[in-house]
Image (spheres, rainbow, N blue to C red):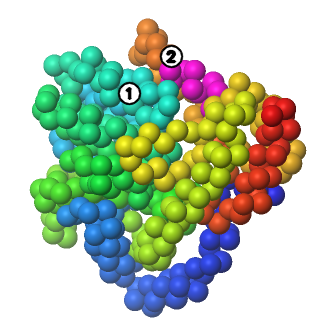
Amino acid sequence: MIPMVDLKTQYQSIKEEITSGILDALENTQFILGPNVAAFETEAAAYLGVKHAVAVASGTDALHLALASAGIKEGDEVITSPFTFIATAEAIRYVGATPVFVDIDPLTFNIDPARIEAAITTKTRAVLPVHLFGQPADMTVIEAICNKHGLLLVEDCAQSFGAAVGGRMTGSIGALGCFSFFPSKNLGCYGDGGMITTNSPDLAETVKVLRNHGSQVRYHHSVIGFNSRLDEIQAVILRAKLKRIRAYNEGRRRVAHLYTELLRGSAVTPPVEDGKGVHVYHQYTVLTARRDRIMEALSSARIASAIYYPIPLHRQEVFAADYKDVSLPVSEETAARCMSLPVFPEMTEEQVREVVRVIKGVTGD
């Protein structure tokens, strides 16, 4: 069997370090906002090249608290992509704001910067690009648009830990960066976890207050906050993996580039690296008109595959009534033809070749 991601093999390679760290944390008995959380925040901030990193309970919370800390509220509009996980738009709704969906680039699957300015209104307060599948959005253009119009720039980096664009890590470009540490992510823990990055001490402090019930001093609450704190044991796991994130991402790129070489000229269109940034391949997502047949053949060969994402956000039931007159043809066409193949750092050349062999058996290439 070839899984989408092989967490068991990865765990076995770092088991001793993780076990030792967890046992130390258990002995220390400081489970909430303990020393490993503080150390992870410092180490992650240094790696990403930002002044502040604040760990929270999930990637969704990271998006929510980032927008809340910046004062995004009811009546505001936030421009974002419709081709992403629903958490991106959920967070906008959590603070009472309205998602404004802009269609994607057909090659990168990221929000199309050329379409952003046409979506700006007097209510627009922020732009929330998603670095989808590990490919950085075109931040040079998006940052310039935000600066021109005085808009907040918040990055959804849930799938892009370690990706870079223009020499800067994703999460270090906007006013705030939002990360997920869901187990399957490039940097993943063994439960839920997330993080917000910023160079603003004021925003960092606001996030810290919001994540801890609106409190800076115990039992003194200045605002209505939330319970969103990264678990100490998860921080142990993340610290162990952070040491290896460069190697993990290099492994993903090795697998992705082999796929692309082997699939070139076939009936399956490989993902495109636009050359503007470093893609870290959280997913290896292809386009094909023969998706159902290929996925059926892969399943028969005990090879995993998946569709990220089959329904664009503006067509989801929860949003459909509000966006019934919105047409985003590139997102809709991509959703109808996309599929993701297994990709993980430990994947062997033999496994990659087996996946491609099964695909070509269907397409006749």
Image quadrant containing the C terminus: top right
Does the magenta run of residues contain 19?
no
Q: Which residue is mark 1?
A: 112
Residue 295 % position (x, y): 77, 37
- Where is residue 6, by image quadrant? bottom right
Please tell me which residue is depicted at 13% across the width and 60% down the height of the picture.
201
Q: Secondary structure at mark 1?
A: loop
Q: Which residue is mark 2?
A: 329
Q: Is residue 299 left or right of residue 265?
A: right
Q: Is residue 340 above or below residue 330?
A: below
Marker disc for residue 343: none
Evaluate whether residue 101 shows in this view.
Answer: no
- Where is residue 332, by image quadrant? top right
| For discs 2 and 1, the disc positioned in front in the rendered view | 1
Q: Is residue 139 left or right of residue 273?
A: left
Evaluate whether residue 184 shows in this view.
Answer: yes
Amino acid beneath label 1: Asp
Q: Is residue 196 above or below residue 340?
A: below
Q: Classify 10 Å Cα crowding around label 2: few (below 14), some (14-19), many (20 and above).
A: few
Front-lying residue, 162 or 234? 162
Q: Give the magenta range.
A: 330-338
Residue 58 % position (x, y): 42, 55
- Where is residue 92, by image quadrant? top left
Does the magenta run of residues contain 337?
yes
